[in-house]
Structures are given as C-alpha cells and as structure tokens.
Image: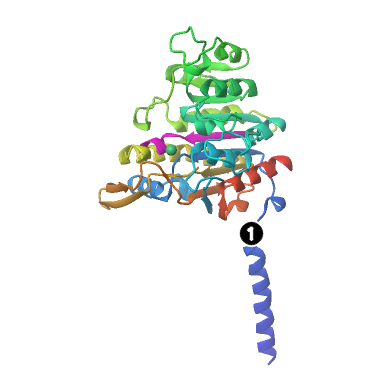
C-alpha cells in the first residue's frame, strides 16, 4: 500500500513537471534577443525544402530544433501575395492583398525594422531580386502599390538603413542618367554616399573593408538567378553581419531569398532547388554567428507557398529530383514552415499565422 502511494506521488510529480516543460513559451517570459536575423524564403513551402534536401542531402535548416507552421491567408483572400504576407510578418497586422506596410484602410503600420531603429539598433536589408521589390519594401515603405519602386527607394534612403544589398541601382539614380528607372531628378546614390560606403560590382564588393554602413547594389534591376549570381547570398549575409555586429545596441537584418518564388511561378524546378540551397547556405552563416554570439535570434520563414510544388519521382542513388509537378502558376494556401534558433526562439514553436511573427518580434523590441 505504501509502495502504491509512493508510486502515485512520483507519477503526480512527473505529470506536473512534464506540464511545466510542455508549457509553450510566450513572448513575455523569454529573454529578448539583442540581434535578430530574419530570413524569408519567398514562396518556399515544405515541398521546396524537401527537394533541396534530396539534392544537398544535409541542409543547414536541419540544425534548428524549434519548428513551426504558419498559415498565410490575407484578410481578403485565402491566397495571399508577398506584400500582404510580408506586411503581416513585418508589422504584426494582417492586411489586404497588395498592401505594402499599410492597414486595410491605408494607414501606415510601423514595422520591425523601424522599431529596431527606435532602439538604436543597426538595420540591414538584403534581397536577391531588387531592394525595392514587394517583400523588402514591407520593411521600409507604406504605399498602396508594389509598383511604386521609386517611392520605395526614397523610403530606403530616408530611413537611413545601414546595410542595403541586392539589385536595383536604376531606382536610385536620376532620370537623365544612363540606366535610370526613375521619372524624377532625385539622386539617391549621391545622397547616400554622404553616409554609406557604396559598391556596384562584385570586385568592389570583395574589396570592401569593414564599413558600418554600406550599399551594394549589384544590378540595375534584379540580380540574376542563383547559378549566375556573381555574389552568392551567403557572402552578402556574412558581410552584412560583419557590418552590423559593430552596433553596440544590436541589429535587425532581413534577408530575402526572392527568386524561390519566381522559379516556382515559372515551373523551373532546377532553379527552385538552387535558390533554396543558396538561401540555406546563408542561413548556415547566420547560425554560425548566432552560435558564437549567443544573443542572436535567427528565424527562417516564408511568406506563402508558390506553385503547389510536389516531388513525384527521383533517384535516391543520384540524389536527384527527376520529376515534380507545379499545380498552379500562382501561390497556394498551404501552410509554410518556420525555423527558429536563439534567445526568444521558443515562442515560435507550433502553428501560428504570419502576423504572429511580427507581433512577437515587435514585443521583443518593445521590452528589451
Ligand atoms: Zn509570387
């Protein structure tokens, strides 16, 4: 009888303990990170990651222990787009398809990068398309259309983001200059050259020292696809971390693997895998920094799934996807994966929506 009593009390203690450790962490009871690195694989679903794993075998993504799923719908549509989805990620507010950093009523929403600036943190923005594209735009601008590229470039310059990398120099030079994509005479490159170190070619990029503020615009509009990109995403990410880790109050860096989405729209399975691997390499560099630094939250998310991509056949021996299907040329409503590492990562485990990511990051920045 005493043994049964003892056993049952042990069981009760174990049950209580397991409830304590199973209790999901919330933003309130965790140590906020000093630095945040947010990777967005545009259009990257579970199928995309599966294909990259088949061909690369081991992904850096496999180092993460905190995983989640995000539902992606916009307020007005089950199938979202990059502006609405990234506005939710960046501001914590779900909005209408097409909206860049604004509410359904068109009012501006403060985003994670702007909150980071308020905290005196360094800020960085990297995209493998052009830096004024729909996804990066949500971290800088508050406009009704993704096609307002010149206005988005103005916002990048006015926010004085410390590190800017990607394509799009055409939007930063006045209309009478060769290659300009602007309709006015504003010269953002000369404005920014007062405060930033500026490079326009891979050679100049690789010759950079250790500036705290830098702009690397390596194409007139979009960067080429991963297999032709003169500077892989990992190099840009490492350079950005090197610059931003010099900021005493920490930093916020957003890195977009933009062309996973484009490859999926075009039904280009080969490029899709190369783009996911390019992003994964950059994630590896961020994890390496975060593991040493111990104060950095690394998040990898997607804004939506593109293509309804499914692997149908392949070779185990050759580590090759040989047959895949794209169910749509557009986006799908499938949930997308989330990976989190570092201080504050536990709060992201489980199933949430895109806006939860923004809300949680902003709560960390409001309660440092
Ligand atoms: Zn898309």
> Residue 186's spot in the image, x, y percent?
57, 11
Per the rendered image, the range of residues in magenta is 252-263
Tell me the crowding category of disc 1: few under 14, some 14 to 19, or many 20 or more residues within 10 angstroms, Cα based. Answer: few
159 in relation to 276, above or below: above
For image coordinates 58% across by 13% down, the residue present is 193
Residue 25 appears in the picture as rendered = yes
Q: Is mark 1 within 8 Å of ligand 1?
A: no
For image coordinates 53% across by 24% down, the residue present is 148
- Which quarter of the figure has residue 140? top right
Q: Which quadrant of the picture is home to ligand 1? A: top left
130 in relation to 252, above or below: above
For image coordinates 64% across by 28% down, the residue present is 246
- Which quarter of the figure has residue 9? bottom right
**Camera-side residue of 96 and 45:** 96
Residue 14 left/right relative to 177: right
**Camera-side residue of 113 and 238:** 113
165 in relation to 199, above or below: below
Residue 341 left/right relative to 56: right
> Residue 168's spot in the image, x, y percent?
47, 21
326 in relation to 153, above or below: below
For image coordinates 39% across by 35% down, the residue present is 262
Q: Residue furthest bottom?
A: 1
The residue beneath circle 1 is 24
- Which quarter of the figure has residue 264? top left
> Is the C terminus in the top left, top right, bottom left or bottom right quadrant?
top right
**Camera-side residue of 152 and 299:** 152
Residue 356 left/right relative to 171: right
Mark 1, secondary structure of its residue: loop
> Residue 67's spot in the image, x, y percent?
53, 53
> Is the N terminus in the top left, top right, bottom left or bottom right quadrant?
bottom right
Residue 210 appears in the picture as rendered = no
> Residue 219's spot in the image, x, y percent?
43, 20
């Amino acid at each position: 009888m005493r043994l049964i009593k003892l056993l049952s009390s042990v069981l009760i203690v174990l049950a209580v303990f397991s409830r304590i450790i199973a209790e999901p962490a919330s933003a309130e009871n965790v140590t906020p990170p000093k630095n945040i690195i947010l990777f967005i694989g545009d259009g990257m679903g579970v199928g995309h990651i599966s294909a990259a794993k088949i061909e690369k075998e081991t992904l850096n993504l496999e180092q993460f222990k905190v995983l989640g799923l995000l539902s992606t719908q916009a307020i007005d549509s089950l199938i979202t787009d990059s502006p609405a989805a990234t506005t939710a990620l960046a501001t914590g507010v779900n909005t209408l398809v097409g909206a860049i950093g604004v509410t359904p009523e068109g009012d501006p929403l403060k985003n994670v990068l702007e909150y980071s600036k308020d905290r005196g943190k360094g800020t960085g923005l990297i995209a493998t398309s052009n830096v004024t594209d729909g996804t990066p735009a949500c971290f800088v601008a508050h406009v009704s259309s993704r096609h307002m590229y010149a206005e988005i470039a103005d916002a990048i310059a006015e926010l004085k983001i410390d590190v800017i990398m990607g394509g799009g120099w055409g939007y930063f030079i006045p209309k009478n200059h060769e290659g300009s994509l602007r309709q006015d005479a504003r010269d953002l490159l000369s404005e920014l050259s007062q405060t930033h170190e500026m490079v326009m070619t891979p050679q100049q990029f690789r010759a950079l020292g250790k500036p705290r503020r830098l702009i690397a615009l390596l194409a007139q509009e979009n960067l080429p696809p991963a297999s032709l990109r003169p500077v892989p995403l990992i190099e840009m990410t490492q350079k950005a971390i090197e610059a931003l880790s010099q900021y005493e109050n920490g930093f916020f860096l957003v890195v977009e693997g933009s062309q996973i989405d484009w490859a999926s729209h075009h039904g280009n399975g080969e490029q899709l895998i190369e783009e996911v691997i390019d992003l994964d390499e950059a994630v590896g560099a961020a994890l390496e920094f975060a593991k040493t630094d111990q104060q950095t939250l690394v998040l990898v998310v997607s804004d939506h799934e593109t293509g309804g991509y499914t692997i149908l056949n392949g070779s185990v021996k050759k580590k090759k996807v040989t047959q895949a299907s794209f169910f749509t040329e557009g986006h799908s409503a499938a949930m997308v994966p989330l990976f989190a590492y570092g201080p504050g990562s536990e709060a992201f485990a489980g199933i949430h929506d895109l806006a939860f990511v923004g809300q949680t990051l902003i709560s960390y920045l409001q309660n440092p």
